[in-house]
Image (tube, grey):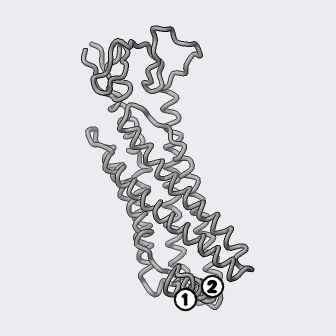
Amino acid sequence: MEIIMNPYKENNKLLKDFFGKPIILITAIAAFLSTAVSEIVSTVPQFQFKSNAMLNMISSEISKLGEKYHLSSGKLEIGDSYTGLSLLPLLIAVAFLLFYIMSRKDTASLAAPTIVFKINAVIALVLSIIAAVFLILFGVVTLVELPDFGIAALPAAIGFSAFLLLYSISQLMFVNSIKKSYSSIYIVKSDAALVFAITSLVSVVISIVVQLYITLQVAPEQTVAVAANWTSTAFSGISQVLIAVVAFKYYFYLRAVTEDLVIEPSGEEPAESEDVIPYQGVKGVGSTAKKCSGCGRPLGEDDYFCNFCGTPVEK
């Protein structure tokens, strides 16, 4: 008896083989710990830096410019906690934990973790756009009001804004490729996963540089605050590195999987009686006389599922 393989189930199995690996669970735990440590450091007064003269001056000048041009209100405080930003690692943790749990169950769907991951990516994109707009506006205002400082601040603002957008857009595209792979008959290679992995590693470097600069500026007696903030940076960095590792592994895993699945075309033109049916990139012989009841597209003579919409073929 011939065994007919459903392409949807096969794709789900391939994805579950990946997301069921221990690295996914470890990444989820690291993201949970990163969120917890970050919240503790941002809410306990003893763990927050007291600004020195240099940081107070920068904060004061930014506040003045913001109030003058209606770009912000109030004094900039080091250690402020922003709900949107603190929510992101928590959503990542929930998404990866769900990916791991659902992948260990044969009948479970990957829809729920993908939705959570996408919510995280959308929030990150919205926050990145808002941050990019304000950074560039502040850069322009600074260039006008404080030319000596603004000549370096504006290019830095533009560069960092571009980085934020690249990070968030690549994350969103990465999530979309996961959804497309488990909800269609195609396994989708994700170059966005590679970009997301690289930008995640760059974000770790940026956070370390920023933390180092702040540490050098604060008073030397603030050892408790320094230790607490470096601990938070370390947990956040470990979480981001693990996320980058997962994205790297996903990229190379799909490359290996699709290379195994795809049969390269021979380069010969198909005969008049042949159609090229895109089932996992495999070239097949079809007939235009038979059409799918779901989408109306041509079916191959030996097809058991429509190569375009996945509808089972009635034999």
The secondary structure type at the circle numbered 1 is loop
Residue 104 is situated, as x and y percent measured from the top left of the image, at 31, 43
Circle 2 Cα neighbour tier, 10 Å, few/some/many (<14 / 14–19 / ≥20): few
Task: Find the residue positioned furthest to the right.
Answer: 148
Residue at point 51%, 42% (across, down): 190
- Determine the residue positioned at 52% across, 87% down: 75
Placement of the C terminus among the 4 image quadrants:
top left
256 or 121: which is nearer to us?
121
Q: Mark 2, mark 1: which one is toward the viewer?
A: 2
Question: Which numbered tag is attached to residue 58?
Answer: 2
Question: Which mark, residue 211?
Answer: none
Q: Amino acid at mark 2?
A: Ile
- Going by the numbered disc 1, the residue's amino acid type is Lys
Residue designated by label 1? 50
Q: Is residue 120 above or below residue 134?
A: above
For the N terminus, give its image quadrant: top left
